[in-house]
């Protein structure tokens, strides 16, 4: 009996296959891979304090009544500010490596 698309054979699975999920990309040389924004801000605050962070990246979330929650909210909505935070975090990592 020939196969008919309207009448699937009993061997065919009539249920839709689950979508294939891409495997996470491994980035061994990317120092930001796996580091959350919260972890970056925490490390920067530990290293420089809110005042020092505000001097290096002059944005309101660091200068006026700074808090982790308000900073994360702002940085998640503002790509240019997040890039500055990522850059300062990378700079801080390099400085710590040199100091060893």
Image (cartoon, helix red, strand yellow):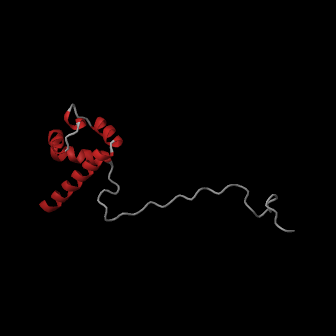
Q: Measuring from the top left, give residue 69's x and y in whole percent.
A: 31, 36
Q: Quadrant of the C terminus?
A: bottom left
Q: Residue furthest bottom?
A: 1
Q: Establish if 49 lies above or below 22.
A: above
Q: Residue at x 72, y 60 (%)?
A: 13
Image-quadrant location for residue 26: bottom left
Residue 50 horizontal side relative to residue 5, left or right: left
Where residue 70 appears, as percent x and y from the top left, is 29, 35
Residue most toward the left? Answer: 99
Residue 8, given in percent of the width and then of the height, sits at: 79, 60
Residue located at (61% from left, 56% from top): 18
Q: How many marks?
A: 0
- The reply, left or right, for residue 62 in relation to residue 4 is left
Left or right of 27 on screen, residue 92: left
Q: Position of residue 59 (x, y in %)?
A: 22, 39
* Quadrant where the N terminus is found in the figure: bottom right
Quarter of the image where one finds residue 46: top left
The front one of 35 and 71 is 71
Determine the image quadrant of residue 74: top left
| View extreme (top): residue | 65
Any part of residue 25 in sight: yes
Residue drawn at x 70%, y 55% as measured from the top left: 15
Q: Compared with residue 63, is residue 33 higher up or lower down, i.e. above or below?
A: below
Residue 100 in sight: no
Residue sitting at the far front: 80
């Amino acid at each position: 009996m020939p196969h008919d698309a309207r009448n699937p054979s009993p061997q065919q699975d009539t249920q839709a296959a689950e979508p294939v999920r891409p495997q996470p990309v491994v980035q061994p040389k990317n120092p930001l891979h796996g580091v959350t924004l919260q972890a970056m801000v925490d490390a920067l605050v530990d290293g420089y304090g809110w005042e020092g962070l505000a001097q290096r990246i002059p944005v309101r979330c660091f200068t006026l009544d700074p808090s982790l929650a308000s900073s994360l909210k702002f940085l998640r909505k503002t790509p240019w500010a997040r890039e500055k935070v990522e850059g300062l975090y990378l700079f801080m990592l390099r400085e710590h490596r040199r100091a060893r």
